[in-house]
Image (cartoon, rainbow, N blue to C red):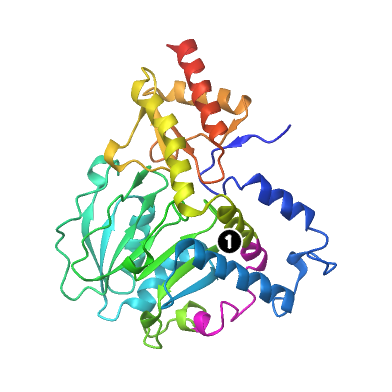
């Protein structure tokens, strides 16, 4: 079997150009006679890899000089604890709960201080983003926390909340590098890389320098202190070397593609093909309020669980993989990250049209 169109929410599709480069360099990276997987993180060859990765990410996102870039293990979920451990000076955080991961972060924060839910869209199965223009944010809140793109529910903050001057912390795992962002609007912007950038097992944390201090909650493990990682250039311990190398390749690919403005344009084009079809379809319908739709994750249903299952099965046979929706929503979900070619989205829509004719 050849390559399929992989609509998985994560670990997810990677650019074919990058996969080919990785394969070509597997036995011998750049004349070193070994794979990056085998390479000492203390070697000059590896230092060049991590330095280039950081430089390219800074360029892509236009990251200001007063922000540190950290390549860390533990995925996004470890940050649910690391953020309060490092940032909860007043032991209070305001959380906006718009999905499963936002909810998990909120519950985790409660272990370390008072987490206050200032807005939620749980009342309609997280199918929209609440109005965040005038929230009741506690005066003494250390920060306001959001999950910017909700992978499971297919919603996206198209406008950042009004934090009333408080620091904004954002989990961008499933929209990372999908469009330009103004990093200076965030205190911390972070994401697991396995959705839109690289292989599972790593998180990238972009954090304003003034927040990196010795002043952390008592009992915070050494490995959970941002300062330790920042002071050691993400090499306090052996970093996720191969992940960083793959992400670096993806950053180079994104630059070659024209950067984040070009990616946004392409992502809007891809999403439009699918959403336009869903809006006119008699059989399939999207589950998200139009104004809050994600460009990355598109959930949809037929309204009949048996028909949904039939669709997923037949789509798989047609080379359209991983379309089953998350168990909390049911139905289907197409994740159309940066590396999903426009042909993949078109193939999905063509298949959906055919399925609709056969099952109307």
Q: In which quadrant of the rendered image does the N terminus lie?
A: top right
User: Does residue 18 lie above or below 6 as drawn?
Assistant: below
Rendered residue at 38%/50% (across/down)? 149
Q: Is residue 274 above or below residue 204?
A: above
Residue 124 in the image: state x and y as whole percent: 25, 40
Q: Is mark 1 on a helix, strand or loop?
A: loop
Q: Foreground: 207 or 315?
A: 207
Magenta stretch, residue numbers? 228-245
Residue tagged by mark 1? 201
260 horizontally vs 112: left or right: right
Q: In this view, does 145 lie above or below 326?
A: below
- 233 left or right of 155? right
Kindly identify the residue that appears in the image at 53 percent across and 35 percent down: 342
Residue 97 visible in the displayed image: yes
Q: Can residue 225 be seen in this view?
A: no
Q: Nearer the viewer, residue 122 or 164?
A: 164
Residue at 47%, 53% (x, y): give it.
Answer: 260
Magenta includes 4? no
């Amino acid at each position: 079997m050849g390559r399929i169109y992989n609509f998985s929410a994560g670990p997810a599709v990677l650019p074919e150009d990058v996969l080919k480069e990785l394969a070509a360099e597997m036995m011998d990276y750049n004349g070193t006679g070994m794979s990056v997987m085998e390479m000492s993180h203390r070697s000059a060859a590896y230092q060049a890899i991590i330095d280039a990765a950081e430089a390219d990410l800074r360029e892509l996102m236009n990251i200001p000089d007063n922000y540190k870039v950290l390549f860390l293990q533990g995925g996004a979920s470890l940050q649910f604890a690391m953020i309060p451990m490092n940032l909860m000076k007043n032991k209070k955080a305001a959380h906006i709960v718009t999905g499963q991961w936002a909810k998990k972060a909120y519950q985790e924060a409660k272990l370390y201080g008072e987490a206050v839910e200032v807005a939620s869209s749980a009342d309609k199965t997280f199918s929209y983003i609440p109005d965040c223009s005038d929230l009741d944010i506690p005066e003494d809140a250390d920060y306001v926390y959001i999950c910017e793109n909700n992978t499971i529910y297919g919603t996206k903050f198209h406008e950042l909340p009004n934090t009333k001057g408080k620091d904004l912390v954002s989990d961008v795992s499933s929209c990372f590098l999908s469009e330009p962002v103004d990093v200076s609007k965030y205190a911390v912007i972070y994401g697991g890389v396995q959705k839109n950038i690289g292989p599972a097992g790593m998180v990238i944390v972009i954090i304003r320098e003034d927040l990196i201090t010795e002043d952390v909650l008592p009992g915070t493990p050494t490995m959970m202190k941002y300062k330790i990682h920042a002071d050691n250039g993400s090499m306090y311990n052996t970093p996720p070397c191969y992940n960083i190398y793959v992400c670096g390749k993806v950053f180079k690919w994104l630059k070659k593609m024209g950067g984040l403005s070009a990616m946004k344009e392409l992502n809007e084009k891809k999403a439009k093909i699918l959403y336009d079809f869903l809006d006119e379809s008699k059989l399939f319908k999207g589950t998200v309020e139009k104004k809050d739709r994600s460009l990355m994750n598109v959930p949809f249903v037929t309204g009949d669980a048996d028909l949904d299952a039939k669709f997923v099965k037949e789509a798989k046979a047609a080379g359209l993989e991983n379309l089953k929706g998350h168990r909390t929503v049911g139905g289907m979900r197409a994740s159309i990250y940066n590396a999903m070619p426009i042909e993949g989205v078109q193939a999905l829509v063509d298949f959906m049209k055919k399925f609709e004719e056969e099952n109307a």
